[in-house]
Amino acid sequence: MSQTAGTADKARRDWRATLRQIAQSSPLTVVLAIVVALVVSAILIAAADSEVQRTAGNLLSQPGDFFAAVGSKVGRAYSALFQGAVVNFSGGNAAGFFKPLTNTVSYSVPLIFAGLGLGIGFRAGLFNIGGQGQIIFGAILCGYAGFAWHLPAGLHLIVCVVLAFLGGAAWGFIPGILRAKTGANEVIVTIMLNSIAAYFLGWILTQTAFKKEGSNNPVSPVVDASARFPALGGTRANLGFILALLAALGVWWIMERSTLGFSIRAVGANPDAARTAGLSVATATVWTMVLAGGLAGLAATSQLLSTSSQQLNAGIAGSYGVDAITVALLGRSKSGGIVAAGLLFGGLKAGGYLMQATTNTPIDVILVLQSVIVLLIAAPPLVRSIFRLPDDDRAKKKAIKKALRATRTEVAA
C-alpha cells in the first residue's frame, strides 16, 4: 500500500515539474515551436499535392520544377490561411477586408475562456482535463435561463452569463473537493466527469422542459434575443470577446495581486512548503477548481449567446475543452499568453476553412500544426536542441556558482 502511495506521490511531483517547466519556458521557445510547426505542416502540404508528386519523379533531372511546385503550393496555402484569418485583400470594402479578423476573434472567445480556467489549474499544479464537462454544465444552466426565462434585455444577458459561470464552477467543485479531501487524482476524476456530463446532456435534451416543441431532434428552444451578446460594429465578433478580455484581466489580478492567487501559485510551486508556511493546500485546491470550472463554463456563452448555435444540442461543447489544454500550454498559463494563443488558434480555425476551399489542402493539416506546437511546447529541451539554444537552467546555475565563488574569494581576502 505504501509503495502504491509512493508511486502516486512521485507521479504528482512529475506532473507538477512538467507544468512548471512549460509555464517557465521562454517566449523564444514558444515562437520557435510555432516556426517548426509551420515548417512541418508545409512539408505535409507539399507532399499531399499532386503537382508536387508529379515533379518529384524528375527531381534529379529538373529540380527547378519540383521546388517551384513546392513553393507555389505552400505559398498559396499559407496565403489563403492568412487571408482567412487576418485580412482579405480582395474584400472590396472595409467590412470585407476585416471580416476574417472578426471571424478569428469569434472563434477565439471560447478558447480564451476555457484556456484561462485550465491555466489557473496548471499554475496550481493541477492537470484539469474536465473543461469539456464544465462547459457542458455551464451551457445547461445558461441555455435554460436563455430560453425559459423571459427577462428584460441586459438583465437577461447578465443572468445567463452568471449561470454559465456557476454551472461550470459547480462541476469544477466536485473534483476539487475530492482532490482536497481524499487525494483523488484530478486527471481521472475530471475525465470521468466529462463522460457523465455528456450523457447527462443527452438525457436532459429528451426532457419536456428542454425539448424544442415540434422537433424530434434532441435540441432545446432557441435562446431569447434579449439574452444574446450585442454584435461589435455589425460583425460576427460580439461583446463576448470584450468579456473574455475582462476575464483575462481579472485572472491576472487574482493570480498576481491577490492573496488567493499567491496561495494558488505557492501550492503549485511546492505544496509541502506552502503547508509548512501555514497555507491551506486543500482550500487553494478547491478554489482553483471552482475558478477553473467557472471560466470554462463561460466558454458556453460564445455558443449559446452569439450567432453560432443559440440552442442546446449534444455537440454544444465541441472540442473546446480539449483545445483549451493546448491554448493554456501555448500561453504558458499566463493571461496575456492565453489570449494570444486563443487568437492564434482561432485564426487557424478561421483560415483553415478558406485554405481548404481555395487550395484543396486537407483541414487536417491545421490539426497537425496544433499538435506539433503542443509537442514542442511540452518539451522545451527538444526546441533548444533543434536550434542549439543554451539551457536557461544551466546558465542560471553557473551564474549562481560563479557569484558564490566570487563571494568566497572576497571573504577570504
Image (tube, rainbow, N blue to C red):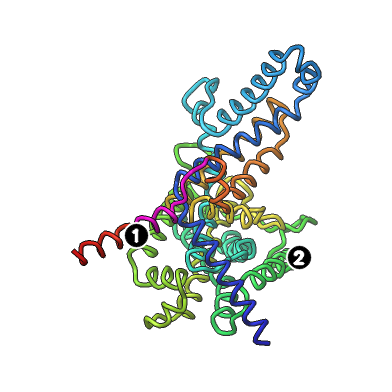
Q: Is residue 390 above or below residue 279?
A: above
Residue at the spot 53% in from the left edge and 65% down from the top edge? 17
Question: Does the magenta-highlighted stretch encompass residue 386?
Answer: no
Estimate how packed mark 2 is, as few (under 14), some (14 to 19) or many (20 or more) residues with alpha carbons within 10 Å: some
- Can residue 329 be seen here? The reply is yes
Q: Position of residue 40 (x, y in %)?
A: 65, 36
Q: Which mark is residue 2?
A: none
Kindly identify the amino acid type of the residue bearing the numbered disc 1.
Answer: Ile
Label 1 Cα crowd, 10 Å radius (few <14 / some 14-19 / many 20+): few
The quarter holding residue 141 reads bottom right
Kindly identify which numbered label has been placed on residue 206: 2
The N terminus, quarter of image: bottom right
Magenta stretch in the rendered image:
388-401
Q: Position of residue 82 (x, y in %)?
A: 56, 30
User: Looking at the image, is mark 2 or mark 1 earlier in the sequence?
Assistant: 2
Question: In this figure, which residue is indicated by the disc labeled 1?
Answer: 400
Q: Give the amino acid at mark 2.
A: Thr
Which percent across, then down, holds residue 236? 53, 39
Answer whether residue 225 is visible to the viewer in this image: no
Residue furthest left as drawn: 413
Q: Nearer the viewer, residue 267 or 323?
A: 267
Residue at the image position 71 percent from the left and 30 percent from the top: 361
Q: Quadrant of residue 130?
A: bottom right
Q: Secondary structure at mark 1?
A: helix
Residue at 63% of width from left, 82% of height from top? 5
Q: Is residue 399 magenta?
A: yes
SS for dot 2: loop
Q: Main secondary structure of the magenta part?
A: helix
> In the image, what residue occupies the spot 75% across and 58% down?
218
